[in-house]
Image (tube, rainbow, N blue to C red):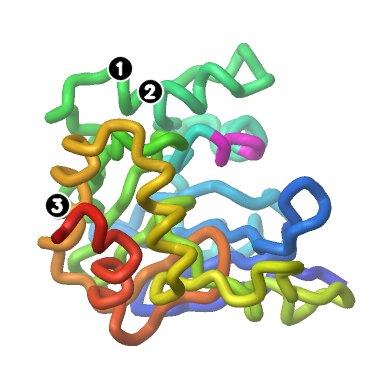
Amino acid sequence: MSETVIREVAKDVWIFSRPFARFGIFPVGGRSTAVKMRNGNLWVLASTPLDTETKAKLEELGPVKFIIGADAVHHLFLSDFKKAYPEAKVIAPKAAIERVQDKTLKFDGAWGSDPEDARYGFEDDVQHCYFSGFSNKDVAFFHPVSKTMIQADLLFNLPPTEQYSKSKSSGHVPLVGNFGPFSWFHSKFASAMGEDKEAMRRHVKTVASWDFERIIPCHGDVIEARAKDAWRAAYKAYLN
């Protein structure tokens, strides 16, 4: 039986949640997110395997036109997605491109190399903010129609209950327990991951200015309430 949990969290926004343990020890979960744009094409943050169930749902929703790598470490499945959807554009941070094992994979955009005001063709539906000062070189995304913010490692909401809901393994995080945006540990983490404090302040404030009511993380449960408060709590070091 598949361990992938597929759910529409808002109109035209789908998540694909699976178990994933960091270093094979810490269960943080994994998640891809698909947004159906107004022209019917799909924008996909590709962070989990393209298994049979995921592929079937994507093909049901519409043609995949954008394959997104959200940060330096969420690149493992970009090549698989590109092989399945050869007409799609692949866009990721420069730090991810440098780490991709498949050196034949062609990228159509690179945050960190391209000009800050570069546009990739999906901005009428999904906005983006590249965190150049964050250790993992993350990109935050905003889908205004559904008031949803989507990101990889900028914000965690553990334990990963939904991601482990079809798994025989436990989603309990050893030693840490709850690692959510309102925890003292998360604000310490956010501060420690900031390599360029001034850049972090700019980008944290940009995201705080977005009108979102939901946060979809790659790791942990979707934040369906008090999402703006969650962001401000996790990044209070850069907002005060």
State how far apart marks 1 and 2 are (Cα): 12 Å
The numbered disc on residue 206 is: 3
Mark 1 neighbour density, 10 Å: few (under 14) some (14–19) many (20 or more): few
Mark 3 neighbour density, 10 Å: few (under 14) some (14–19) many (20 or more): few
Q: Quadrant of residue 162?
A: bottom right
Mark closer to the observer (1, 2): 1
Q: Quadrant of residue 88?
A: top left
The picture places residue 55, in percent across and down from the top left corner, at: 64, 55
Up/down of 44 relative to 177, above or below: above
Mark closer to the observer (2, 3): 3
Q: Residue at x 77, y 46 (%)?
A: 23
Q: Looking at the image, tell me whether mark 3 or mark 1 is earlier in sequence order.
A: 1
User: Is residue 76 one of those drawn in magenta?
Assistant: yes
| Magenta residues, start to end | 73-77
Residue bearing mark 1: 113
State how far apart marks 3 and 1 are (Cα): 20 Å
Q: Amino acid at mark 3?
A: Thr
Q: Please indicate whether residue 126 sits to the left or right of residue 26 in the image.
A: left
Residue bearing mark 2: 108
User: Is residue 39 one of those drawn in magenta?
Assistant: no
